[in-house]
Image: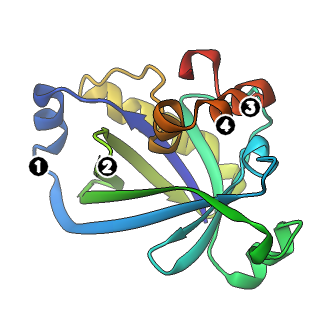
Amino acid sequence: MIEIEKKFLLNDAERERLLSGATFMETVVNIDTYFDLEDHSLTCRDCWLRKRNSNWELKIPLHALGEKTAVTHYRELTEHDEILAVLEFNFAEYQPFCTIVTTRRRYKKNDFSIDLDSCDFGYDLVEIELMVSEDDDRAAATELILAFAQKYGLRTDRVRGKILEYLRRFRPDHLRQLVEAGVAKQQDL
């Protein structure tokens, strides 16, 4: 599956507008531990290997470095063999560089998933997401998310995701490498 997602930082009024009429689905606590090689060569390619609770996941970008827009496009791999086929080394070669505990309140509104994430290090954000199965559907999904956000008066400026915010606060040298590689922006520092 392909994840098309936009992150938002919302004030109380924006959150209330967005959730009005939405259906609450569940609350989930995710413990995400992110892994990379010592030289950060995986994340410097905008690939994100994590263990979410007890399951391995790999997010692979569907954009060239430097082309990243406010709406992200990633292929999510969750099958062990698929992940191994992409990684240059075995899982044992990768070391953890951060763990984030996130309480996620998930809502559904029309075809959109709305995730309100509260991270254990004091960062809250909202993700509006569509999943598509075909690469050809990415552009349409992007437009749908932006139109949905505009309908509810949400600001569509760029927002740091939780992992970049974590790196900004606790591992600035790693974040600087990501900026140099074109994965993150100078404004993320």
Q: Is residue 80 left or right of residue 149?
A: right
Q: Which residue is mark 2?
A: 119
Asked if the residues shown at circle 1 and circle 2 are in contact, with their CB atoms under 8 angstroms apart, the answer is: no
Dot 2: what SS?
strand
Residue to which mark 3 is pinned = 177
Q: Which mark is residue 21?
A: 1
The residue at 49%/81% (across/down) is 54
Q: Residue 144 at x, y = what percent? A: 45, 39
Q: Quadrant of the C terminus?
A: top right
Front residue of 10 and 165:
165
Distance from Cα at disc 1 to Cα at disc 3? 42 Å
Question: Disc 3 and disc 2: Cα gap in Å?
Answer: 23 Å
SS for dot 1? loop
Whether label 4 touches label 3, CB < 8 Å: yes
Mark 1 or mark 3: which comes first in sequence? 1
Q: Give neighbour class at mark 2: few <14, some 14-19, many 20+ (Cα, 10 Å).
A: some
- Picture disc at residue 174: 4
Q: Residue at x 34, y 20 (%)?
A: 155
- Residue at 62% in and 46% down: 73
Three-letter amino acid code at disc 1?
Gly
